[in-house]
Amino acid sequence: MSLPTENLNGRLEELRRDLLDPGGPQLSQIRAYRFAIFHYAPSDELEMHRKMAELSRDLDQSGWKVIALSAMELFLKRVERESRGRVERLIQAERGHFERDPAGGLDYLQQQVSRWLEGPKGIAADITEAIKGRIEPGAEARTVVFIGRLGAFYPFYRTSALLRFLDGAVTVPVILLYPGYRAGERSLSFMGVVSAADSDYRPHIY
């Protein structure tokens, strides 16, 4: 059963305080672990983005460099690159499988897409490269990354898998913007789909 996902403003204020702490970002009790997840009700999508824009301005005025990445944009670029321009053929093949069996269409698409997403050389490598390419030399201590549009990966790839590969490869704080609900103290359910609840999370969940 999903727990209430409410008090958006209160949780944003908590995130703001932790990022701007005089002793440095306080996202985790483990000093070297720089990841956190900010979850929000899908119905709050527009409000969340408006509030995040306000937070980004506050951080910028406090001397921080804010890097905003779209998981969907990076995913689509990888699909285009890895499919070698055969995206239309992939779409047609999926439609053919779906017409015979809707579940078969999803299975076919998952087989094709999972090889582009999974592992250290999958989408995590693209995200790592995008982050490193936008960090200004010497500014690591004052840089934070927000990654949104994570729904692009569902149902082919779990956010917890992404975090495992970013850990050790990224040296700046990273906040994942997660459209879903808390399904337990350490669990999240994407878009409220109970069957998709993932409890494999180390970072603090705001």
Image (tube, rainbow, N blue to C red):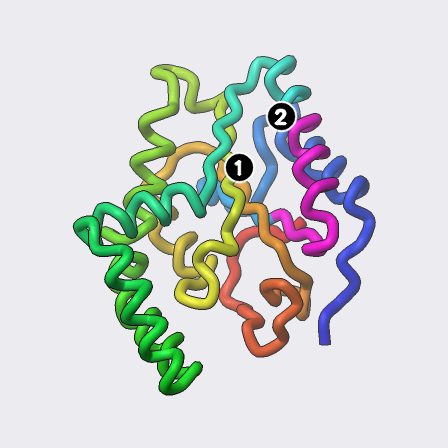
Q: Could you say where residue 148 lies in the image, as x and y percent from the top left?
A: 53, 43
Q: Is residue 46 magenta?
A: yes
Q: On the picture, is 103 further left or further right than 47?
A: left
The residue that label 2 is drawn on is: 56
Does residue 156 show up? yes
Q: Which residues are magenta?
A: 38-55
Circle count: 2
Q: Could you say where residue 112 lies in the image, as x and y percent from the top left?
A: 27, 67
Residue drawn at x 61%, y 67% is 189
Q: The N terminus lies in which quarter of the figure?
A: bottom right
Q: On the picture, is 178 further left or further right than 153?
A: right
User: Which label was assigned to residue 146?
Assistant: 1
Q: Which residue is more in the foreground, 76 or 39?
A: 76
Q: Magenta region's main secondary structure?
A: helix
| Residue kind at label 2, given as amino acid type | Ser
Given contact means CB atoms under 8 Å apart, are the residues at marks 2 and 1 in contact? yes
| Residue kind at label 1, given as amino acid type | Phe
Can you say whether 68 is above or below 163 in the image? above
Q: Quadrant of residue 135?
A: top left
Can you say whether 131 is above or below 29 in the image? above
Residue drawn at x 32%, y 63% is 91
- Local secondary structure at mark 2: helix
Q: Is residue 189 magenta?
A: no
